[in-house]
Every structure is written in structure tokens, then in C-alpha cells.
Image (spheres, rainbow, N blue to C red):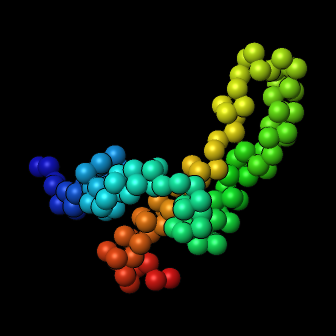
Amino acid sequence: MLKTNKTKGTENENQQKLCISDGTAHDLKHPFIQEFSELLSRVPLNTLLYTLMTYQQRLLAKAIWESENYGGSESKCIERLKDIYGYRWQQVTKLSDHMKPFRDYCEYVLILDHQQQWNKQKNPLHCEK
């Protein structure tokens, strides 16, 4: 006779709740994320930096940008491109393909903060640590 394991059913149910690929759950977890992202993309950079972002958010965005973009130095990026492609690197690639705009990182930090605020709103006890 086969034994049934009732706990497996609840285990599978919990896995479905936590599934990363469940796009509808993400919309419920962080409402208005698409609209917020679109709004940020339309706001001028100065407004992003000095009206919407705190000093700490600006520092975080700058630190992430510098860590991923040659310390924020175009000259360092150009030197690296010369090492990789030679002195005619401009015929092979563009600087913009290797250095991302600082604005992207500002938007990213604000979106992370938006998500964190929704997480705190939904689980105030869980996020207080």
C-alpha cells in the first residue's frame, strides 16, 4: 500500500507563493512600480538628485556607478578600451557601450527605496530590524 505524505502538498503550495517568476505577485508586492519607473525616467536629472533623493541615496548611487564604471573616469575607460581594442578602439566600439549613465543608477536607487517602503508597509514588524 502507498503512503501519502500530506506535508508535500503544503510544501509545494509555499514554493508557489515564493516563486520568483510569478510576475503577478510582484505587481501586488510592489504596486505602481511601472508607473514610478516611468515617472523617474521623465524627471530632469537635477530634480532627481536634489529634490527626490536624499544625500545618502546620492552617495549610494554614485558609489554603485563608480564601482561599475571605471571609478567614474572616462579617461580610465578609454585607457582600458585602448588596452583591449588598440588605439583605433573607436572603430570597434563606443564609449557609451562601456560606461553607463549616472542617471540610471539614480533611478535604480529610488526604485529600490520605493520597493523597501512597500515592503515596510506590508510587513511593518518584519522589516524593522
Q: Residue at x 38, y 57 (%)?
A: 36
* Picture layout, residue 92 above or below residue 16: above
Indicate the position of residue 70 as horizontal and vertical percent values.
Answer: 78, 44
* Residue 66 percent coordinates (x, y): 73, 52
Q: Residue at 30%, 48% (x, y): give it.
A: 23
> On the picture, is 17 further left or further right than 98?
left
Seen as rendered, the residue at the extreme left is 1
Asked if residue 65 shows in the view, the reply is yes
Q: Residue at x 47, y 59 (%)?
A: 111
Foreground: 31 or 2? 31
Among the 4 quarters of the image, the one containing residue 118: bottom left
Q: Position of residue 127 (x, y in %)?
A: 44, 78
Near-viewer residue (65 or 119): 65
**Residue 76 lies in quadrant:** top right
Give x and y (percent) for residue 10. 21, 61
Does residue 45 appear left or right of residue 64 in this picture? left
